[in-house]
Amino acid sequence: MPFTVADRRGVGRTSLRVTQLGLGGAPLAPRVHRDRALTRPTPAESDAVVRRALEHGVRYIDTAPLYGLGESERRYRQPLQSVARDELVISTKVGRLLDDSPRGWHFDFSRDAILRSLDGSLQRLGVDRVDIVYIHDPDDHWQQAIGEAFPAVADLRAQGVVGAIGAGMNQWEMELRFAREGDFDCFLLAGRYTLLEQGPIGEFLPYCQSRGISVVVGGPYNSGILASDLTPGATYNYEAASPEVLARARRLAGVCARHGVPLKAAALQFPLAHPAVAAVIPGAQAPGEVDENVAMLRAAIPAALWSDMKAEGLIDGAAPVPA
């Protein structure tokens, strides 16, 4: 049975429920430094993307101060006012504090920085609260993240300022360590549980499932390759894919083609089959890309496609697949 956009799934053991299709906020703003002019997407284009997602029933939106140095959060502000706040689940991130340096930010996982960052996010978003706060990319800052950032966000949760707390990263190993050493509700894992990669299937996802911790899958297209024409130069992990990765992606596409299924549909639906996964949050830079993501989520995929992928060793045999 195809997925539907507005179906909601719980976040950990909290009362929050997210739509299983969310909207990632990174592509809503250009990746810029302080000394560079803003380029595409324009504010009007970003506004149209958010409004189209809301029209389709998407009610989970994710962002971060890092994205466009606050611009992503600002671009959500107006369109989100068209929907009742209680219908939305909004997540943002802490740990990269905006500043006036040429780069525009610095890592800071101290309590003071967490509070300052969240206050800035609320002002840019134009809301009085966010629902989920993720500790953002603490890869090289474990001690401060677990020793200072975690207690700070846990206090915000205890006070009812936020509904859920987690970490957002491009690796699952440290997220597993967070899960074991702290009391977290959810994790945002980008690019590591996809058609191309199922590393978390062995340890991280089962642990989260057993502890009632939800996982939000970011980057379901692996930074573009699974949504591309698979020609040389297709991006994987934010750089040109290696010949080996490109060859594997083409084999996945070949199985999809035999069954008349777009590769993007298989890529978007696959992570949602795992019971620990609450949502996938692809990004978009144009309303047509939102429409396409919705169509890919709804596309019918025969069980034989998943069987063939497992038989050919393209996806882990232990990975759950859509019914």
Image (tube, helix red, strand yellow):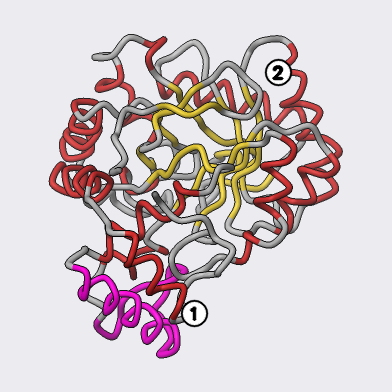
Q: Which mark is residue 156?
A: 2
- Residue that appears at 69% across and 43% down: 208
Residue 221 in which image quadrant: bottom left
Q: Residue furthest left?
A: 288
Residue 41: tell me if it is visible: no
Looking at the picture, tell me which residue is in the foreground, 184 or 323. 323
Please, what secondary structure does the residue beneath circle 2 have?
helix
Sooner in the amino-acid sequence: mark 1 or mark 2: 2
Looking at the picture, tell me which residue is in the foreground, 301 or 154. 301
Q: Is residue 284 above or below residue 318?
A: above
Q: Is residue 247 above or below residue 58?
A: below
**Residue 231, image x and y in percent?**
24, 83
Specify whether residue 55 is painted magenta. Answer: no
Name the side, left or right, on which 185 lies relative to 235: right
Q: Which mark is residue 61?
A: none
- Residue that appears at 42% across and 49% down: 34
Measure how far apart labels 1 and 2 are at the Cα level: 44 Å
Question: Which residue bears the numbered disc 1?
Answer: 313
- Residue that appears at 65% across and 51% down: 205
Q: Which residues are magenta?
A: 231-259
User: Cβ–Cβ below 8 Å for labels 1 and 2?
Assistant: no
